[in-house]
Amino acid sequence: MRVYENLAAVVGGTPLIRLNAVTAGIAAPVFAKLEYVNPGGSVKDRIALAMIDAAEATGQLRPGGTIVEPTSGNTGVGLAIVAAARGYRCVFTMPDKISEEKQAVLRAYGAEVLVCPTAVAPDDPRSYYSVARRVVAETPGAWSPDQYSNPHNPAAHHASTGPEIWADTDGCVTHFVAGIGTGGTISGTGRYLKEVSGRRVQVVGADPEGSVYSGGSGRPYLVEGVGEDIWPTTYDKAVVDRVEAVSDRDSFLMTRELARREGMLVGGSCGLAVVAALRVARELDADGCVVVLLPDSGRGYLSKIFNDEWMYDYGFLDRPSDEPTVAEVL
Ligand code: PMP
């Protein structure tokens, strides 16, 4: 029988799909690694599984324990899936800019969600980092994976994402492009691809304008899951050859293009990464081979990026003139 014992068995092994429409006029092929086909719907299933396995092995996480994490949603889903199967309780903290749908998903898996203000410094006691630390200190049997410092975050990508890309491109990949949040994806995957290619593969980060990785001060931006106002230890600067800063507007318009023209309903950090990937691909001839990692699905952003009113309100789309719509004419 071709069956699996549990959801953990189908984490990873995601497909590379060529981008055909948004790449018009570009000679080098650009392949999207579609992470939304993971069982929890994002790239973060990979690290959730690796971090929990490691914590069980070292005894940091024991039967009946509580998993506490500051997460924008995707890591939470990955942790919640494994926790549901293995009987752990989950408490997640997140900034209030995160969409309601994402909070609702975590609650659906049985997790407790604490929503904290976005516009405070990371060391402010109200920040979602500080609140998570306090919950750990006050809860017996609590363990925090801390995806911002846990070496099993980049290690999971070194062990799976990197080898998958190398194998699926028959070693032809020349450039790897990914957004940077904790930096786990780009550091682990990038390090593997550098090692296996004798440092031939170029590693390019995509960062929201205003975030520290591209020289910003941490000023707020709207794209979720990427960019930081702190430098996490999971980010290995030495692996990254170049960082491209991308605006919210360009990220969101590309995200909508990916749905309409490629049939890929993906999140805002995917649009951001594709904008950076196309900048890189435009510089290459047909011998180039660009792989861009798309972290999650667009389902969590229907009330924002895919909602015209929201896009008008932020000025990312021009409000149409007073001309009657097709519905009004009929
Ligand atoms: N995009 C989204 C939607 C994410 O949730 C994350 C994780 N924070 C990333 C991109 C960035 O991945 P990483 O943390 O591995 O840098």
Image (tube, grey):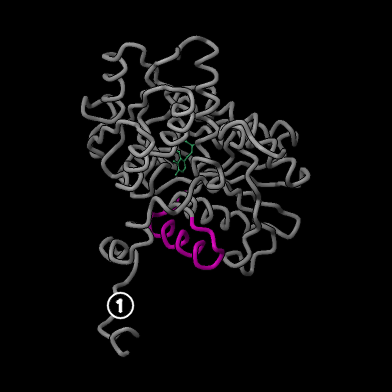
Residue farthest to the front, as pictured: 1
Q: Which residues are magenta?
A: 245-265
Q: Which residue is mark 1?
A: 320
Judge by depth and name the residue closer to the eye, 134 or 85: 85
Q: Estimate the x, y position of residue 170 in percent, counting from the top left.
A: 78, 45
Q: Is residue 254 magenta?
A: yes
Q: Is residue 7 magenta?
A: no
Magenta-colored segment: predominant secondary structure: helix
Q: Is residue 219 left or right of residue 5?
A: left
- Element under label 1? loop
Instruction: Give the residue at x 56% y 64%.
Output: 262
Residue 69 in the image: above or below residue 117? above
Residue 244 in the image: above or below residue 40? below
Q: Estimate the x, y position of residue 163 in percent, counting from the top left.
A: 70, 35
Question: Which quarter shows the C terminus?
Answer: bottom left
Judge by depth and name the residue closer to the eye, 169 or 50: 50
Q: Is residue 151 left or right of residue 65?
A: right
Judge by depth and name the residue closer to the eye, 160 or 317: 160
Residue farthest to the right, as pictured: 170
Circle 1: is it few (<14), some (14-19), or many (20+) Cα within 10 Å? Answer: few
Q: Estimate the x, y position of residue 178 in percent, counting from the top left.
A: 54, 44
Instruction: Give the residue at x 66% y 50%.
Output: 16
Residue 197 in the image: above or below residue 258? above
Q: Estimate the x, y position of residue 3 in percent, counting from the top left.
A: 66, 37
Instruction: Give the residue at x 29% y 73%.
Output: 319
Residue 88 in the image: above or below residue 114? above
Question: Which quarter shows the N terminus?
Answer: top right
State which quadrant residue 181 falls in. Answer: top left
The amino acid sitting under disc 1 is Pro
Q: How many marks?
A: 1
Instruction: Give the residue at x 51% y 61%.
Output: 258
